[in-house]
Amino acid sequence: MAPRDGGQAKGTHMSGIIEAKTSQYLLALLPARDPVMQEMERYARQHGVPIVGPACGRVLYQLARLVKARRVLELGSAIGYSTLWLARAARASTSRRVSASSIAKPSCVSLMDMCEGRLSAANRSRMSR
């Protein structure tokens, strides 16, 4: 069963915004994420990398679908979690291949390499369905 708690870095799990029971309820409503998303959430949790989490990611996805986004540019991605949500929304709006690219500071190059690898893996798994 896919984790529904998001996998956000410690301290970023909607704390201070809504009550814990409400947060748990909202997260339980989300559809299960695929293995690539789950792995990114697990990595973020284990390494303290802040990500938007599945609830916010789903909102980003829905907003991009609402405006029928065909291209997405995200600046400042850590491991590409929100980029993946946006790219999937754009892919749903077009029959063309969706790609993501980022510019990183030298200190962020290894994270960006990881991000690009995960986006490629997600694209391959999605294309094979």
Image (spheres, helix red, strand yellow):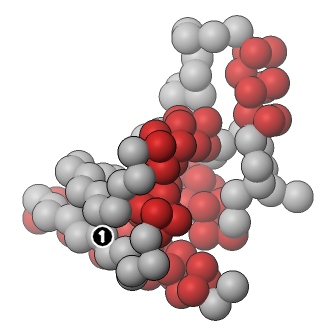
- Residue under label 1, please give it: 100
Res. 104 visible in picture: yes
Q: Is residue 49 above or below residue 100?
A: above
For residue 3, above or below residue 34: above
Q: Nearer the viewer, residue 52 or 65?
A: 65
Q: Is residue 51 above or below residue 74?
A: above
- 46 or 53: nearer the viewer: 53
Query: Would residue 73 appear left or right of 51 to someone viewing this image?
Result: left
Q: Is residue 2 left or right of residue 128?
A: right
How far across and down, in percent of the image, does residue 26 sit? 74, 27
In the rendered view of the protein, which quadrant contains the N terminus?
bottom right
Question: Which x, y percent locates residue 113?
Answer: 31, 75
Q: How many marks?
A: 1
Residue 103: which quarter of the image? Answer: bottom left
Q: Amino acid at mark 1?
A: Ala
The residue carrying pointer 1 sits among few (fewer than 14), some (14 to 19) or many (20 or more) residues within 10 Å by Cα, namely: some
Residue at 20% across, 65% down? 102
At a point 69% along the width and 66% down the height, the residue shown is 34
The quadrant of the rendering that contains the C terminus is bottom right
Which residue reaches farthest right? 1
- Quarter of the rendering containing residue 58: top right
* 8 with respect to 22 (left or right): left
Taking depth in this image into account, of 127 and 82 the one nearest to the observer is 127
Provide residue 86's location: percent of width, then percent of height: 42, 55
Residue 79 point in image, percent of width and height: 39, 59
